[in-house]
Image: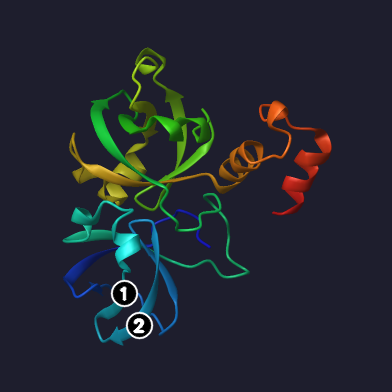
Amino acid sequence: MFSGLVREIGHIKSFKNDILRVQCTHKAQIGDSIAINGMCLTVIEVHNDGFSLEISKHSQSLVALENYQGAVHIEPALRADSRLDGHFVQGHIDSVGVIKSITPLENATRFAIAIPKEKIQMIIPQGSVCVDGISLTIASIDEANKGNDKEAIFMLSIIPHTLQNTLFCTYQVGRRVNIETDMIVRSIVHILKTRDNTQAKNTCSWSELDSIALRY
């Protein structure tokens, strides 16, 4: 489990035969879970200047694999006594987004990100989303793009501190990014979709909401 707060920007030394070697100052141990650009991976070897992790073929097919070179976001797994300054993040990428526009504002930078249409139901304005391992607040959903059958667009307003201390300051239009939607929202959507009472899939009773909440 992670919080979506990047602890360090590391560098990829090599990526071959499914093994990703990362150079960084974090002292990992074999078996540790570490999120690299938001994807949860397991340390299989440690080095003086970093560690190595293995990425399965399945995981490779789910992420923006071209970004696993050069600089990457690193976050070690949360400890039981860790502060939670972001939101609960599993490190399970559920879609890949594309940056559509970057607009400087007075005290922030607005990023418009397109995702597959079916994922927008898990994007809630003022809710949380994890982009390349960073916990961010969703500013809005682009209502003008609702007619698009293939993709939907949501907006992020990135404050200067986040922009300057993450790789977002290097991102350009067209870049693909790893997206993990909020795990609680994702669970609720899944439960509603798979309910036995198909006529009531768009509703949820208070007892069902209590049951969902108790799982967390």
* Classed neighbour count for the residue bearing mark 2: other residues with Cα under 10 Å, few (<14), some (14–19), many (≥20): some
The image shows residue 147 at horizontal and vertical percentages of: 37, 14
* Classed neighbour count for the residue bearing mark 1: other residues with Cα under 10 Å, few (<14), some (14–19), many (≥20): some
The image shows residue 102 at horizontal and vertical percentages of: 24, 29
Q: Which residue is mark 2?
A: 44
Q: Nearer the viewer, residue 196 or 99?
A: 196
Q: Amino acid at mark 2?
A: Ile
Horizontal side, residue 92 vs residue 214: left or right: left
The image quadrant of residue 38 is: bottom left
Residue 5 tag number = none
112 is higher (above) or lower (below) than 87: above
Horizontal side, residue 209 vs residue 70: left or right: right
Q: Nearer the viewer, residue 44 or 50?
A: 44
Contact between labelled residues 1 and 2, with CB atoms less than 8 Å apart: yes
Tell me the element at label 1. Answer: strand
Query: Which numbered disc flags the more N-terminal residue, 2 or 1?
Result: 2
Tell me the element at label 2. Answer: strand
Name which residue lies at 71% across and 26% down: 199
Q: Quadrant of the C terminus?
A: bottom right
186 is higher (above) or lower (below) than 93: above
Q: Nearer the viewer, residue 126 or 149?
A: 149
Q: Which residue is mark 1?
A: 54
Horizontal side, residue 75 vs residue 64: left or right: right
Name which residue lies at 72% across and 46% down: 212
The image shows residue 97 at horizontal and vertical percentages of: 31, 39
Gap in Å between the C-alphas at discs 2 and 1?
Answer: 7 Å
Name which residue lies at 53% across and 63% down: 1
Q: Amino acid at mark 1?
A: Glu
The image shows residue 93 at horizontal and vertical percentages of: 41, 52
